[in-house]
Image: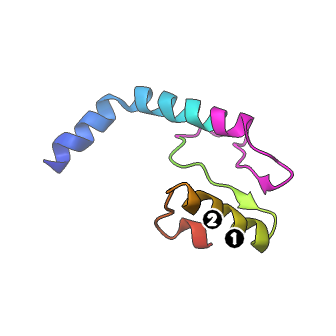
Amino acid sequence: MLAAFLLGQLENMDLITRSRERVYRLYSANSDEELLTLPTIPPDCEANYHMFFILLNSLSARSRLKEHLKSRSIILSGKHHDC
């Protein structure tokens, strides 16, 4: 079953990557770079847009963002947000 799922992912890899790229560009265009640092893709690299991460400029900004997201029922999961 897992192999079938992964085969479907491989068969649709270009479509999935383009969809992720659209989200990446939307987030990038609507982000306040005074409050956070956005990911950059080096010119000699190709991204698969697996995740969109941000680096906040201070611990207080990070705390405020987490509360803001929580107030809108957006729950952070995984370990990425605690780095």
Q: Which dot marks residue 51? A: none
Task: Determine whether the residue tagged by mark 2 lies in a helix, strand or loop.
Answer: helix
* Residue at x 72% of width, y 45% of height: 40
Q: Is residue 61 above or below residue 36?
A: below
Q: Can residue 44 be seen in this view?
A: no
Give the quarter of the figure containing the C terminus: bottom right
Vertical relation: 26 (above or below) 49: above
Magenta stretch prevailing secondary structure:
loop
Alpha carbon separation for disc pair 1 and 2: 5 Å
Residue 29 coordinates in the image, percent (x, y): 73, 34
Tell me residue 17's x, y (percent). Answer: 48, 33
Whether 31 is drawn above or below 75: the answer is: above
Q: Which residue is identified by label 2?
A: 66
Classify residue 71 by image quadrant.
Answer: bottom right
Disc 1 vs disc 2: Cβ atoms closer than 8 Å? yes
* Dot 2 amino acid type: Lys
Magenta part of the protein: which range?
A: 26-48
The structure residue drawn at horizontal position 51% and vertical position 70%, both measured from the top left corner, is 79
53 vs 41, nearest the viewer: 53
Magenta span includes 28: yes
- The circle drawn on residue 63 is 1
Toward the viewer: 68 or 43?
Answer: 68
Is any part of residue 49 visible from this angle? yes
Residue type, numbered disc 1:
Ser
